[in-house]
Amino acid sequence: MHLTQLNRECLLHLFSFLDKDSRRSLSLTCHLLREAFLDPHLWTLLHFDSPCELTRDNFVLGPSLRYLAVRWYSSRVLQVCNIEEWLKSAFQKDICSKHESLVSTFLAHVCHKCPNLLCLALSGCGHITDQDVTSVLQSCSKLRRLHLENCVRITDCSLEGVAAHGDSLEEVKVDFCRNITQAGLRAVREKRPHIRLSAERSADMIPDSKPEERVSVRMTLKKLLQVS
């Protein structure tokens, strides 16, 4: 039997064993396989190892997506992304400009196309914002697990989004997110006590502070020392 003689269910089962690039390559051989590739039921799980993969035409976003992960472990790039914005050199800003909107733009598409998402994991995505997270919580009301790791722009505002829109959430992790505070974690626990909430190291790290804020703190400490 020729491959194209298989019914849609068999074709989808066959595609399920292939990675994204292999699926796309096979789909370019004929219209029937292209239709199978574009079937949303094939795309229940998506995993990306870097934001640049989000720009490739080798996957489909649709209502069947349940599990999504974007994990970036490039230490060289992460070191640049993790620098406070006002401390970056022109060269470092130029590096970030090439990818800083990729994940946010992708999440905006997820909000519009994937209402049945159950699990979202973002790691090393240094440019996503609280608004990105809150938008996902508002649009994907069935979301059960939210895992954020080493996302430096995430603050207590994301936790406020969890408290306000996390009706279906069962588990939230905000690990190594330095701008999360103990107060923000307590607020979520009070509003959503059923959520399994963990924050490895996050609230114990040094949060970002603008240069003028640091000067103000130093001046206050200086005055206190003078008085004492």
Image: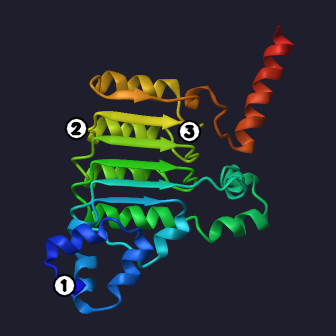
Alpha carbon distance from label 3 to label 2: 23 Å
Q: Do the residues labelled 3 and 2 touch (CB within 8 Å)?
A: no
Find the distance from the CA under tag 1 to the CA under tag 3. Answer: 54 Å
Q: Name the quadrant of the N terminus.
A: bottom left
Which residue corresponds to the image point at 33% horizontal and 47% vertical from the top-left?
Answer: 119
The amino acid at mark 2 is Asp
Residue type, label 1: Met
Q: What residue type is labelled 3?
A: Cys
Place of residue 28 in the rendered image (x, y in percent of width and height, measured from the top left) = 35, 89
Q: Tally the marks.
A: 3
Neighbour tally class for label 1: few under 14, some 14-19, many 20 plus, Cα within 10 Å: few
For label 2, the residue is: 167
User: Disc 2 and disc 1: Cα gap in Å?
Assistant: 49 Å
Residue, disc 1: 1
On the image, numbered disc 3 is attached to which residue?
177
The quadrant where residue 95 appears: bottom right
Mark 1, secondary structure of its residue: loop
Identity of the residue drawn at 64% across and 30% down: 205
The image quadrant that residue 42 belongs to is: bottom left
Across and down, in percent, residue 135 comes to: 34, 54
Q: Residue 41's spot in the image, x, y percent?
A: 21, 66
Which of the two discs, 3 and 2, labels the residue nearer the N terminus? Answer: 2
Find the residue positioned furthest to the right. Answer: 226
